[in-house]
Amino acid sequence: MSLDTQFLTMVIMFSSGVYLGMVMDTFKRFEPLWKSNLIMRYSFEILFWILQGLVLFYFLFLANQGELRLYIVLAVVCGYAAYQALFRETYKKVLERLIKIISGLIRFITRVVTVFIVRPVRFIVITIMKLILLLWTTLLAIILFLFKILLYPFQLIGRITWKLMPKNVKKYLLDVAGFYSKMKNIILKWWGIIQQKRR
C-alpha cells in the first residue's frame, strides 16, 4: 500500500471516527422515544451497530479495498476522541436547532394540510351526506304523500261499503278476521317452538 493510499486511509478513517461520534449522539438523542420498550430498545441497538459497522467497512473499502491494520483502528479512535473533545457540544447544539426547525416545519405542514385539505374535504363530505339524506327524506315524504292520495279513494269506498253493510255481515267478517288472527298466532307460536327444539 503506497504512502498516498495510507494517508488517504488515515484521513477517511479519522473522519469515520468523527462520523461515528455524531451518529452515536444522534442515536442517543432519539433513544427516549423507544427506550421504554425493551424489545425495540435492543433491536434498535443491534441494528444501529450493524449498520455502523457496514458503513465503516464501506469507507475502509473505498480507501484501501478493505485492508484492515492497527493504525486504521487508531485513526478511527482518534477521530472519535477529536469529535468528543472539539465538535461534540457544537454538533449537539446544531442537532437541537435542526430538530426544532424540522419539528416546526412538520407542525406547519400539518396545520396547512389540516386547514386547506382535511377540513375542506371533511366539510364537503359532510355537506354531501346531509344533502343526500335531505333528498332521500324529501323523496320518501313525496312518495308517502302520493301513496296516501292514491289510497284515499279506496279507503273512502271501503268506509262507505262498511257503513252500508248489514250488521250480520259485519259480525261475520269480524269473526273471520279474528279466527285468522288466532290461527296466525298459533302457527307462529308452534313455529317458534320447533325452531327452539332444532337449536
Image (tube, grey):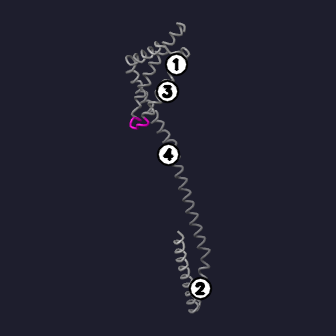
Q: Which residue is mark 4?
A: 119
| Residue at image coords 42%, 15% | 78
- Which residue is nearer to you in this view: 68 or 144? 68
Do the CB atoms of the residues marked 1 and 4 lie less than 8 Å apart?
Answer: no
Q: Which residue is mark 1?
A: 59
Task: State the CA–CA distance, disc 2 to disc 4.
Answer: 60 Å
Sequence-wise first label, 3 or 2: 3
**What residue span does the magenta drawing correspond to?**
33-40
Q: Residues within 10 Å of mark 2 (few under 14, many from 20)?
A: few
Residue type, numbered disc 3: Leu
How much space separates mark 3 and mark 4, taking CA atoms? 42 Å
Callout 4 amino acid? Arg
Q: Name the element at disc 3.
A: helix
Per the image, the residue denoted by label 2 is 160
Task: Check the picture and name the quadrant holding the N terminus.
Answer: top right
Q: To which residue does mark 3 refer?
A: 51
| Relative vertical location of residue 71 with respect to residue 35 in this rendering, above or below | above
Element carrying mark 2:
helix
